[in-house]
Image: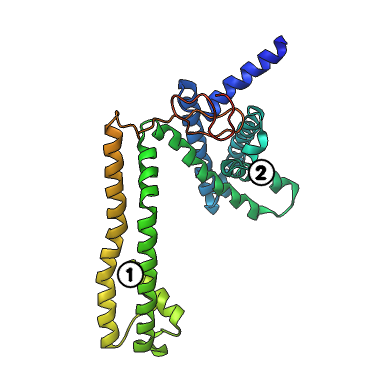
Amino acid sequence: MASTKSEKGWKSRVHEIIYEADTPMGKWFDILLFILIIISVLLVMLESVKWIDATYHRILLVLEWIITILFTIEYIARIATIKKPWTYIFSFYGIIDFLSTIPLYLSYIFAGSQALLTLRAFRLLRVFRILKLVRFLGEASLLRNALKASRAKITVFLFAVFIVSVILGTVMFLVEGEEAGFTSIPTSVYWTIVTLTTVGYGDIAPITPQGQLIATVIMLLGYGIIAVPTGIVTVEMGKQANVKKDSGNEHFVHVNTQACTTCSKEGHRDDAKHCYNCGSEL
């Protein structure tokens, strides 16, 4: 019985550290994780430089093995400290953690599988986990809510932009023709989108006065198109900020980074006693 309680105790302590950011140890763990991610990314970048890899290959390899082992220990600890490991293993971050850990092992099991090492780039996605610390201040939640509220408006706007791009692309195909590089309507639509977004690769360009006039209109229209979604999100962020300031507003809910020990779900209310996903006691 004592052994069971002791096991439950250490699992609870480890779970609190690696899954949550509301405690001092949890914050330090996330900071350490962030540092390891940055170092890992820098190692990948340095290995891509031939003369650096040729000169310091052994050092880079040792450092990569150290970080890989630390990531492996973290992955195993996350599985061991929740009651339903499969909920983490098959979650988004669980899959990312697995994919970002195995390439170095596989490179030694399967000869010539160097291409698999590019999977280490998935570790970049682990940086988003550090947003737990930002959510401490409520800013990440504010941005998330603003994007959710803007979703319908932005979807309608993007659909309208797509229709305009198809129409203008078709017009350019009729005006310019194959001689100017507008070989098909899809190609013309591609040029229109590139121009609307002010990217302007220059691989296709109008040569007739009529086409250049239309291109000028599209370029000017592009500035307005860039501003619209920005304005939509900004307005919604302002609304969310006002709700946040009004602490007495009954619709404003404070959430924390407490993670369920059964299913590892986060984002519970401060006054929550049970997990909103599986119903387990927090």
Looking at the image, which is closer to me, 146 or 247?
247
Dividing the image into 4 quarters, which one contains the N terminus?
top right
Q: Name the quadrant containing residue 140.
A: top left
Residue 130 lies, in percent from the top left, at 46, 36
Q: Amino acid at mark 2?
A: Ile
Residue beneath disc 1: 196
What residue is drawn where x is 51% and y is 48%? Answer: 45
In the displayed structure, does residue 149 sit left or right of residue 60?
Answer: left
- Of discs 2 and 1, which sits in the foreground? 1
Looking at the image, which is closer to me, 267 or 76?
267
Q: Is residue 151 above or below residue 98?
A: below
Q: Is residue 38 visible?
A: no
Residue beneath disc 2: 102
Q: Is residue 179 above or below residue 115?
A: below
Q: Is residue 247 above or below residue 147?
A: above
Q: Residues within 10 Å of mark 1 (few under 14, many from 20)?
A: many
